Image: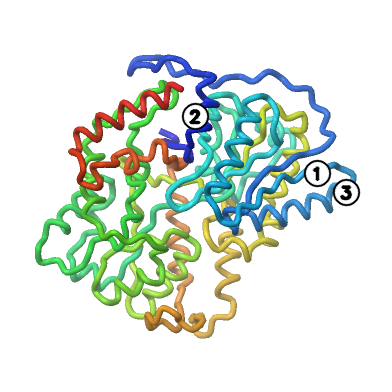
Amino acid sequence: MKKLHAPYLCLPLACVFALTACAPGGADTEPRPIEAPPPVEQTNEGLTVFYTDFKTPESNILDVAVAQYKGQHPDQQLNVEKVFTEGLVETHTAAYNQMLTEIMAGSGPDLIFFANYSTGSTTDWEKLVRRGAFADMEPYFEADNFDWSGYNQAVMDGGVYGGQRLIIPLEYKIPLLYTSQTALDETGFSVENCGTFDGFLDEVEKMIADPEQTRDVFRTKLSIYDFAQYADIPYIDYDRQKADLSFPELERGAEIYKALPRIMDSDDLPGAADIRDGNALWIYPNDPVRGFLWGAGLINTYDDVVMMPIRDREGGIQAEITFAVAVNSSSPNLQNAYEFIKLLLSEEFQKDTVQYRWAKLSVLDAAVAENYQYNTWHAEDGKVELEPDSSNLGFTYIDPSPDDFEEMMSYTKQVTGTFFRSSETQFIQLLGGYITDETSYGDAIDAAESRLNIYLSE
């Protein structure tokens, strides 16, 4: 399965989708085809771009893109609909819902951007794809002979549906865990047994059940918050509009999640300290670029770092698309939209914005390498001095090894599928009362499956 989820859909947007509701399908129902939007006469007289400032790194990147595009196309009318949220997710969500309502009504901006945030997002890309909201940009890439070499093709394919390039990923992350060799030796946790998700569950359950263990297997609940997507469990079928929550791995993962410490933070610098101090085995930094520097780089200052991806049920790696762009299918400016997207993907632009790429992995491998060089060029004897540690955790430098960087990048080459996060279909969020011990797993699953089937049919 290529991808499971799309980002977080709020109730006002659900009303938009209800306009195209149909009856839910069964297990043997033919997949519902992607709706084909009517052709739109192309004028390419201008371009309208929509985004908010809620996610700072991504909005900074788009600010630069807007400025460069204006410089390259001075005679073209570029309308920028940038919403300033003052850090309020409610403002961000309301702006996106309004914009998506316009798109479903056949108007709205030409370019739509999505950037996730820690436990949710604001656009249900999977639903929008199936409602014919996005234009197929593949003909434009083909006509331009766009060179895809150097890009993570498995991630880029996450935006292709039935041969149509409806979404263009820009950044992503993979579920990569970090620990120290000493911590592994102390716990007896076997990386070799984690070649599949089931093997991973076995090792985690064994450690949790061992009363002699003094370390938490994971430091934060966010480490496996999206375990159902990492495992590529097909519990959501958008095409047939049906949910199936009977997979045993779902219950096993939920039980592990419940047993974890109630810590929700970046899991990088404080995580490395907890591994050093004997409190935790694995950390999963929320931001993979900075997480490598502050995960592997910090662990290397006191031990040998060990990295391990959480693999899916077949042994592959599922990547979360965290930043992407799509083009309104009602747009009369598809060529202009393509030129803007081409700018975003270009190596020159990505290197121009390297200072804003400290969070997620670029789809362009050269940009990830550029970021590593940007953050380590001033190293002395391989060590990069840290600013004074305000958290008093005792770190004064990081030691990001080039060999470790190559290992980290090798896992990005093993991506076999992608997903978008969605609060409406995110498994842990669906369980509600079970996580807080207010209801049984069976009752929570029954309620969640019923709610999902209604949601998917809207």
Could you give the CA–CA distance between mark 3 and mark 1, rounded to whole angstroms? 9 Å
Residue 383 in the image: state x and y as whole percent. 48, 81
Residue to which mark 2 is pinned = 14
Looking at the picture, tell me which residue is in the foreground, 219 or 439.
Answer: 439
Q: Could you say which disc has been placed on residue 78 in the image?
A: 1
- Residue 362 left/right relative to 73: left
The three-letter amino acid code for the residue at tag 1 is: Leu
Where 401 falls versus 249 (above or below)? below
Asked whether residue 371 is in view, the answer is: yes
Q: How is the image coloured?
A: rainbow
Q: Residues within 10 Å of mark 3 (few under 14, many from 20)?
A: few
Where 448 falls versus 212 (above or below)? above
**Residue at image location 60% in from the left, 33% down from the top:** 100
Total numbered labels:
3
Q: How crowded is mark 2: few (under 14 residues within 10 Å), some or many (20 or more)?
A: some
Q: Residue furthest left?
A: 211
Q: Earlier in the sequence, mark 2 or mark 1?
A: 2
The three-letter amino acid code for the residue at tag 2 is: Ala
- Which marked residue is nearer to the observer: mark 2 or mark 3? 2
- Which marked residue is nearer to the observer: mark 3 or mark 1? 1
Could you give the CA–CA distance between mark 2 and mark 3, rounded to whole angstroms? 39 Å
Q: Residue furthest right?
A: 75
Secondary element at image label 2: helix
Residue to which mark 3 is pinned = 74
Residue 198 in the image: state x and y as whole percent. 23, 44
**Residue at image location 66% in from the left, 58% down from the top:** 60
Looking at the picture, tell me which residue is in the foreground, 406 or 112.
Answer: 112
Residue 358 in the image: state x and y as whole percent. 55, 63
Quadrant in which the N terminus is drawn:
top left
